[in-house]
Amino acid sequence: MLGYAESHLRIALVHPPPRSEFDRRWARFPALGIAYVASSLRAAGHEIRLLDGKLDYLTVDEIVDSVRDEPPDLVGITCMTVEYPRAVEIARRIKLDHKDLPIVVGGAHVNAVGKQALLEGEAFDYACIGEGEYLACELAEALVRGDDPAELPGLVSRRGGEIVTAPPRPPPADYDALPFPAWDLFRSVKTLPLLTHRGCPFQCVFCGHNSGFKPRYRSPENVLDEVDEMVARYAPERIRIEDETFGLHMGRTKAILEGIIARDLQRRVRFSAQTRVDRVDEEFMRLLKTANFEELELGVESGNPQVLLETQKGITLDQVEHAVALARANGLRVWSKFILGHPYETRETVRDTMRFIAKTNPDKLSVSIMTPFPGTPIHEMALRGEGGYRLLSGGWEDFDKYSSGVLELETISLGQLKRYQIACYVNLYARNRRFSELGRLVVSHRAVGLEMLRSAVGRTARETLDRVTGRRAAAAPQPAPRPAASPSNADDLLPTPVLHSAFGRFRAPARPTAVRAKHDSPQA
């Protein structure tokens, strides 16, 4: 287990508040990373105060005021890419009141950009790169002793006028030794997250592999002990397994499911998980249902086979249909997730995705817009102008995959992508005559829906103005080669008048006659 410091620090851990309605939608769930760091620091003897801007709906002002009124010895801020500007603002304002108060920043964005987090955030003293449980404790212990922490593996530090980057930190050798997340520091919620392994070996071009490529596993017994504690102490209605692929190591996964059943946990809490469509079989689905899993999330990404190949995800549409059928046969709800704006995407391949969504008819749907997060191959492609991409101007606050304003294609403008995003939802429910569900979705997600609509209308108006003034036409380069579309069937999509009434004027794109030119195949 983690060792104890000779003395303790008062540490404030901060999660910045949400920026958009999409962000607020996910604010119903506590974040695993900060919960693991909090439990590790507390196990090492430190006093922890949590300022969760997301879950507790705290504003930047309220977070800064709390630190001003009760100054800690150390502030730690976690952030995703879209949250980084608010993390910078919080740190800057804290430093105005307490210029000598050390501030460390970590999280997925910092893992991707490294020392750039300190170059852009001048109020940050340290950046934590990689898994933070042990590094946070070592940093705190160094500050207690008055030592220079700059050489701690995984830490980026300010030393005078320079920024020092220490060697990388290897992952922990034993994840069973980590304390369970400190959910008692968070307000009570209906759903708690659970992580049974870290790392993903697959090569999807849109993923930054924040936890690395090599999978590292907790033992089934340790996972089951945590579930026992979660149910006994916090009584959630649901536990959402956050593994990037639940079922990556199928033998171990089935042992966890059998353990849930053996401990009778399925009678006390419901579960959900996400997996890949090429990792499922009949026994797995049966065990999920018996263990009281109510929902299975599937990353499908595209309904066009050539575009799917470009993602390097390594799945096929036949595998998607097989996985959906298996889930349905075993009484599991299916939540399918897609992305619009893949490399060499065209309007017709997007329409293929719309058709495939309606054909597979998932119970729940998420459609995001390709966002070139730092650390992803897509980001590098966008910087080089490859894949038919045009990188738009905008700060980190625009890197929201559901309301992105960062990227468009030479063949599809950002405004068109946003309109297609809405059309995917409308087409799914209307084509399958699920009108009452669509109505309930509009009511329950009205804030998100209005933000999507405002974003699409605003971007479309800007593009129309640019077209009228000639600015866009002058800037647009020649279209890049693109993937061939699947054979079209107009009956598979909503009639154009229905799309008009759904969200204003929406022109069904003309069917391209060109076929994507041959180019280098994706790496395996």
Image: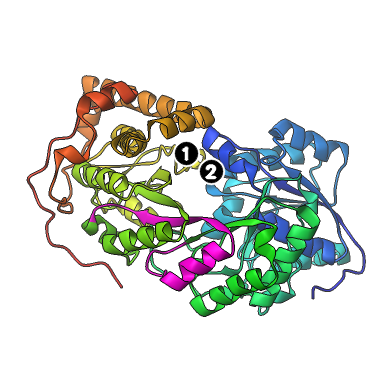
The image quadrant that residue 322 belongs to is bottom left
The segment highlighted magenta reads 275-304
Quadrant holding the N terminus: bottom right
Give me the disc on residue 82.
2
Q: Residue furthest right?
A: 7
The amino acid type, in three-letter code, at marker 1 is Asp
Label 1 crowding class (10 Å Cα cut-off): few <14, some 14-19, many 20+? some
In the picture of the structure, the residue carrying the numbered disc 1 is 398
Q: Position of residue 278 (x, y in %)?
A: 37, 68
Q: Which residue shows up at 38% across the image and 24% down it?
A: 458
Quadrant holding the C terminus: bottom left
Q: Which residue shows up at 31% across the image and 46% down it?
A: 357
Q: Position of residue 153 (x, y in %)?
A: 66, 71
Secondary structure under tag 2 reads helix
Q: Against 212, is 188 above or below?
A: above
Please check the rendered image and state whether residue 293 is part of the magenta-colored stretch, yes or no.
Answer: yes
Q: Position of residue 423 (x, y in %)?
A: 32, 34
Q: Is 316 left or right of 236, judged from the image as shown?
A: left
Q: Earlier in the sequence, mark 2 or mark 1?
A: 2
Can residue 372 be seen from the camera position used here?
A: no
Secondary structure under tag 1 reads helix
Please check the rendered image and state whether residue 190 is part of the magenta-colored stretch, yes or no.
Answer: no
Viewer-proximal residue among 496 and 217: 496
